[in-house]
Image (tube, rainbow, N blue to C red):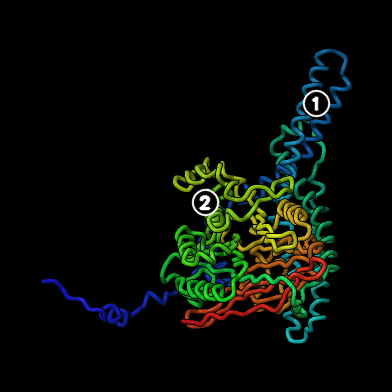
Amino acid sequence: MTRSTSADEPSSIQGRLLLDPRHGDVEDDAASPGQRSLLAIAGSLLVEISLPKLLFAWTTLLLLPAVLLGLAPLLASAWLSILSEQILVLTEIGAALMLIAIVAVGWFGWRPLLRIAETSFWSLNALAVQPSYAFCREALRHLTERIWPNSLTAALRMRLRRACSLGAGILLSAGAALIAILVWPASQWTAGLIDLAMDHHLVMTTLANAIVLVSCYLAAASLAWGFADASMDQPADLAAFDVPRSDARIWRVAHLSDLHVVGERYGFRIECGRAGPRGNERLAAVLARLAAIHAADPLDHVLVSGDMTDAGRASEWAEFLEALSEHPELAARTIVLPGNHDVNIVDRANPARLDLPFSPGKRLRQMRTLSAISAIQGDRVSLVDKSGKVAANLDDQLAPHRERIIAFAERGGLRRSAGLRRLYEDQFPMILPPEQEEGLGIAILDSNAETHFSFTNALGLVSIEQVRRLEAAMGYFPRARWIIALHHHVVEYPMPTKRFSERIGTALINGSWFIRRLQAFADRAVVMHGHRHIDWIGACGALRIVSAPSPVMNAADDAPSYFYIHRLVSGQDGRLCLAEPEKVEIAGS
């Protein structure tokens, strides 16, 4: 006898559930900084971290670069010592041949040695030096704002920011100088072959050399950064929006960010846990609303400034691309860029997850992201080669690597991963060229720092190479206006924060330097970013900055959310003006 069913039966089952799985449980908050304190997450990290992997990562990322940096002057001095000795005894053919061999070794070896020293130096700089200054600066700012939480006017807050930058530079410089003085007796800057053969002595000497070099750099650089940050224009709320002229060209740009698509129907996001929405219905509502707006009044661009996915998983990318494909008119105008949740390591169950530097995991996330970007905009965006010229589009650039990317995604492996080592980094910045000489272009940057730890995955850094290519591309179109799009916020907002974790570890480590570089283009550019899910429009000097709220992350299922459609206006003398945006609200379910 077969059992009959009815349409009401599923609802009656849900009604009888003691624990409704659609609502999640405490496990969905395991890695959520919105539901658990930073101290609680740090406690979980200490319990769950793999100590062997952590030790290996520290050795690879910190100890090895330090040893190579400290060894470089010893090798160079040893070579010069041998060279001078051979010159003094140059009296016969054998000595002449030996001299030629030594010169040849130096000629062919100094460039690799210089590259190793340079790479090691900037590796230590990005991992330790710049974050130390940023941490110290934001700690002072947070402390002063907590002391006077209600009495800070905008002008006073700006002066405090300047003072804290200068104070951080002085404090860090003094501390670094003290370390250099204490370690100096153990350092050694010249060596011979005998010194290089003393293994135990050599290791301690090279480490001492590295500490002295990095400390001296930090002492000088922190002062320079502190004075530069104190003297630069501080961020401030935008005083007023521009009023478009009647004959002005207006570009309508919908700015979305931090969609955090999940791969499960009832899945929760890592950051917000049960305080945020389930599944992807909110995204579907956002795209449907955008499609209706576009049908009534066409949009020029839809910019998604990173974190399209919640953890960079293949299923999440599939959900995002499928949702976007439901609206082909929007897809044809959409520009996306990578966020830290797309390419850096994230794990909703384990905040202590650590990928080793050579692990294929991060490379795989990069290839997924690059594949999705290519599918959405690959035939529309151009790349900038190392000479600064705007070259082939993304699809053409990736075509020769297509088979290797597929083979790596199918079978993985360290060798296949190593074969794609520079492919991801070389694609940025991407440029959506302006349609006319005085049109609007979009520069697409990758602002994700090289991190391998789930607890530090939010760090941001714009490389010097990217900025040089960006400046070259903008110079290639000297009369164009620009949206400079990246994921991370370039500066901490001029507003109070409740928790120190909101200030540190998320902004660009080199954001102040990046802003100074962009000031030359401030009259014809606007920066648009996401990352913090905060609604803010402001400026640093003449450079205008737009931070996008998340239309998904900031509200649970039953609460409304919103995003903006910005109106960028052609001004006189090639200026790019920013008119008052249109706020689009999405009702809760």
The residue most toward the bottom is: 150
- Residue 159 in picture, x, y percent from top left: 83, 76
Mark 2 residue crowding within 10 angstroms, few (<14) / some (14–19) / many (20+):
many
Residue 354 appearing in the image: no
Say what amino acid the circle numbered 1 marks. Val
Secondary structure under the numbered disc 2 in the rendered image = helix
Specify whether residue 425 is in view.
yes
Q: Is mark 1 on a helix, strand or loop?
A: helix
Identify which residue is drawn at 50% across, 76% down: 276
438, 100: nearer the viewer: 438
Callout count: 2
Residue 372: give its label. Answer: none
Tag 1: Cα neighbours inside 10 Å, few (<14), some, or many (≥20)?
some
Q: Give the label on residue 103, or none.
A: 1
Relative to the observer, which residue lies in front, 395 or 269? 395
Q: Using the image, determine if residue 196 lies above or below residue 304.
A: above
Q: In which quarter of the image is residue 157?
A: bottom right
Residue nearer the viewer, 427 or 205 = 427
Q: Do the residues labelled 2 and 1 touch (CB within 8 Å)?
A: no
Front residue of this view, candidates 81 and 336: 336
Alpha-carbon span between mark 2 and mark 1: 43 Å
Q: Position of residue 150 (x, y in %)?
A: 74, 86
Amino acid type, label 2:
Leu
- Which of the two marks, 2 or 1, is nearer to us in this view? 2
Q: Position of residue 268 (x, y in %)?
A: 47, 71
